[in-house]
Image (spheres, rainbow, N blue to C red):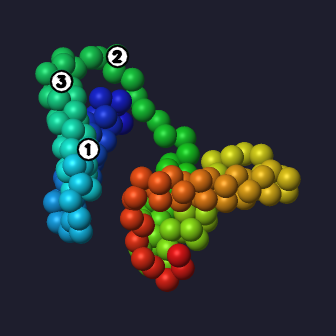
Amino acid sequence: MKFKTAEKIFLVLVMIVASILFYGSSIVRIAFREPVTPRLFGQTISGLLFVVCTIRLIKLFLLKDNEEDKRIIIPRINLVITQIALMVLYAICITKIGYFVTTFFYLFGMILLLRDNNSKKNIVLYGIGSLLFTIGLYFLFKTFNVFLPNAWLF
């Protein structure tokens, strides 16, 4: 596949995700008044993402086809597919199981998947790092009053 074609496909996929996020942000129920609500934040970010992708896509269509356009080869396509599947699974599980457990296992699994050196010592360090990151992110969310989904485990 040519690089330009792959970029067009990717931009269209990101635009679809941005549209879904925009719609999801528009149906968020606001429990209290704040200057910046989750609805406004989600719509702004997803709207900007959509606009930027649209501009880039238009530029790609206006550019002349280059005979020397690089071909793109994805050497580890199974890794990419696994990452996408894990991201979708994480998005589903965070609302069913809970933030702590899901985020810890997702982060730990992604690190193991992406790292080549998985000795016992490194696996323990990855687990500790994943736990510390999950706890740190939780406290950051609590500091900024970001509500996490109520689920089965935390």
Q: Nearer the viewer, mark 1 or mark 2?
A: 1
What residue sits 40% from the left and 71% below the top?
A: 149
Q: Nearer the viewer, mark 3 or mark 1?
A: 1
Q: CA distance from mark 3 to mark 1?
A: 21 Å
Q: Which residue is mark 1?
A: 45
What residue sits 34% from the left and 16% below the top?
A: 68
* Residue 38 picture quarter: bottom left
Q: CA distance from mark 1 to mark 2?
A: 35 Å
Left-right relation of 105 to 2: right
Q: Where the N terminus falls, by quadrant?
A: top left
The image shows residue 51, relative to residue 70, as above or below, that is below
Q: Are marks 1 and 2 in contact (CB under 8 Å)?
A: no
Left-right relation of 37 to 154: left
Q: Which residue is mark 3?
A: 59
| Dot 3 or dot 1, earlier in sequence | 1
What residue sits 72% from the left and 45% below the top?
A: 116
Left-right relation of 59 to 81: left
| Dot 1 or dot 2, earlier in sequence | 1
Amino acid type, callout 1 = Ile
Total marks shown come to 3
Rendered location of residue 22, percent (x, y): 19, 54
Q: Which residue is mark 2?
A: 68
Pointer 3: residues within 10 angstroms few (<14), some, or many (20+)? few
Q: Nearer the viewer, mark 3 or mark 2?
A: 3
The image shows residue 93, relative to residue 77, as above or below, that is below
Amino acid type, callout 3 = Lys
What residue sits 49% from the left and 83% below the top?
A: 152
